[in-house]
Structures are given as C-alpha cells and as structure tokens.
Image: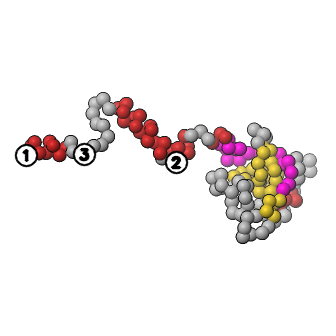
Amino acid sequence: PGRAHFHLHFAKMGKPRGLRTGRKLRTVRREQNWADKGYKRSHLGKEWAKPFAGCSHSKGIVLEKIGIESKQPNSAVRKCVRVQLIKNGKKIAAFVPNDGCLNFVDENDEVLVAGFGRSGHAKGDIPGVRFKIVKVSGVALIALFKEKKEKPRS
C-alpha cells in the first residue's frame, strides 16, 4: 500500500518544489506576469508617453478654437479647442463642455485640462478628443456657465 501511494504522488507535473527552486519560481513568475493585462499596462512604462505624463490634470495655452464634426448617426459641430500643454509643449484637442461655453474661452487663455474619464478613450460621438476643459484663467467653466463668477479681465 505504501508503494502505490508513493507512485501516485509523482504522477502529475506542477511548479518545481524544493529547497533550491526559489530562483526558478521567481523568474517564471516574472515572465508570466506579463501575460496579465493589468500588470502589463502598469509596468510597460507607457504612461510617460501620454500628453499628461501620468497626471490627472494639466495646464495649457489655447492655440485656436475648432469645431469637430460628430460621428454618425449624430450630426453636430462639437466645440473644441487646440491646447498646447505648458509642461511638455504637446498639442492636444480638448472639448469645451456645456452650451455656449466656447464664448468664455479665448485664444492664448490659460486653461486647465482633464481627461474624459474613459482612460484615454474618446467620449461619445467626438472623434479623437480625449480631454475636456475644466477651468479658464483660474475660474471653473461651471461657475462661468452658471454665472456665479466672472472671468478676470486680463
């Protein structure tokens, strides 16, 4: 009976076990981790290549106002602005939310830009626009929209 039990124990393969398998276990885990989508995303180091370089918000200067045509089946001109980020000089397109808020944004204004909350994907029917305007020259767009505050005269 003892011998049969001994034979069953070795029938299946698995991870190496034993006193001197530490290095093997570690290297195998290190290689296998890259198959994990979440691990790969956080360890590839691509975060710095994005316009915000790892930050949630970023300040920029408005270069021009642009109207971007929405995707099918919608038909509208979405009001956006071209922004040059101050910290790295990258140029992005950012959406100006709310009705008539483009009137609060002028060229050469300093704006605070945030993501759309879609982890780098465009939102809705606006093609290729992944950012939105939050503040204009230090004042929140919502405050201007609701007429709580005035834009400072510069």
Residue highlighted by disc 2: 38
Q: Which residue is pictured at 72% across the width and 70% down the height?
A: 73
Disc 3 crowd rating (10 Å Cα; few below 14, some 14-19, many 20+) is: few
The amino acid type found where label 2 is placed reads Gly
The amino acid type found where label 3 is placed reads Lys
State which tag comes first along the sequence, 1 or 2.
Answer: 1
Along the viewing direction, whichever of 115 and 10 lies nearer the viewer: 10
Q: Which residue is pictured at 73% across the width and 60% down the height?
A: 126
- Residue 11 in the image: above or below residue 67: above
Disc 2 crowd rating (10 Å Cα; few below 14, some 14-19, many 20+) is: few
Coordinates of residue 128 in the picture (x, y in percent):
72, 55
Residue highlighted by disc 3: 12
Coordinates of residue 110 in the picture (x, y in percent):
83, 47
Disc 1 crowd rating (10 Å Cα; few below 14, some 14-19, many 20+) is: few
Q: Secondary structure at mark 1?
A: loop
Read off the magenta span: 50-66
State how far apart marks 3 and 1 are (Cα).
Answer: 19 Å
Residue highlighted by disc 1: 1
Cβ atoms under marks 1 and 2 closer than 8 Å: no
State how far apart marks 3 and 2 are (Cα).
Answer: 30 Å
Q: Is residue 58 found inside the magenta-colored segment of the image?
A: yes
* Quadrant hosting residue 143: bottom right
Q: Is residue 150 found inside the magenta-colored segment of the image?
A: no
**Mark drawn on residue 25:** none
State which tag comes first along the sequence, 3 or 1.
Answer: 1
Q: Secondary structure at mark 3?
A: loop
Coordinates of residue 26 in the picture (x, y in percent):
40, 34
Cβ atoms under marks 3 and 2 closer than 8 Å: no
